[in-house]
Image (tube, rainbow, N blue to C red):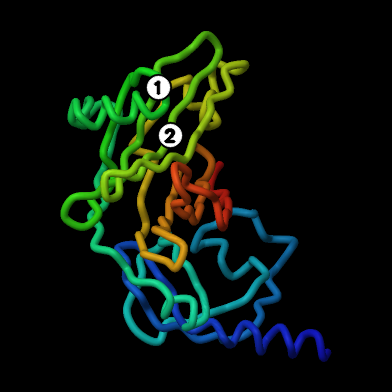
Amino acid sequence: RDVARAAEREEARVQQALCPGNELLTVQFTGIQAGDAKRDTGRASSQNFARQAGQLFGLTDGEVTDGDVCLLAPPEFFRAREPLPVEPLLAREDQGDECSETLRGRIAAARKRPLAGCWPVAVIGDEDGAYVVLFERRGPDALAALVLDRGGRLAFRDYPGNTTDASSVWRVDDGGVFDPGAFDILFVIEGPQGVELGVEWAGAEGANVTLLQADGALLRERLAAYFYRAP
């Protein structure tokens, strides 16, 4: 019982949520939901929400949309961070290549590998941005990446493909086609150690959500979750 009370006191410290569009909302811990293990489908959906066990938080201001993914944390976490102006963009494979030749050249030179495609996924501030790129294949080596261009410096998060299964190279049942439109930049904040991005990468059965932090030429994973949604 003492352990449970200590856990509830810790959860009560969580009072804010950073949601898509860099919207910082106020939340309140309302208790522990027991769920229904026999009827829980494992899907992260509003229809299955009441059957899942876990901590419950309620919004005390603002609104969210069904399916939104938010980052919940104590106030001191957000006091040490500043949301940056961000405009998420829809990047689809059929949009074609929309990156400038200059940017393509910088990325290719940084990785010493030609690009097969480059798509903007977010505008950050006045001059910076986030991009999804696909590198040319080298035999069985397939590689895509999320790239942050911040102040003229590039940081990468690699997504190597698994070419041993041609039907599911990057995501289950992707047919071997890389889809830049599956990426969504949820929020961008300036943290004590550098820029941090909330990234959702959707697939046929669910979505990977990560909190990435710029560290030199890398975007390092700080938090990660998977939301199973179908079938």
Residue 42 in the image, given as x and y percentages of width and height: 64, 54
Q: Residues within 10 Å of mark 1 (few under 14, many from 20)?
A: some
Residue appearing at x 38%, y 29% in the figure: 110
Relative to 74, residue 102 above or below: above
Amino acid type at mark 2: Ala
Kindly identify which residue carries mark 1: 135
Residue appearing at x 49%, y 63% in the figure: 46
Relative depth, front residue between 45 and 218: 218
Marks 1 and 2, Cα distance to the nearest angstrom?
8 Å
Residue appearing at x 67%, y 69% in the figure: 53
Relative to 34, residue 169 above or below: above
User: Which image quarter holds the C terminus?
Assistant: top right
Disc assigned to residue 159: none
Picture quadrant where residue 79 is located: bottom left
Residue 72 in the image, given as x and y percentages of width and height: 50, 72
Residue appearing at x 47%, y 55% in the figure: 213
Q: Earlier in the sequence, mark 1 or mark 2?
A: 1
Kindly identify which residue carries mark 2: 145
Left-right relation of 190 to 129: right
Picture quadrant where residue 109 is located: top left
Left-right relation of 95 to 73: left
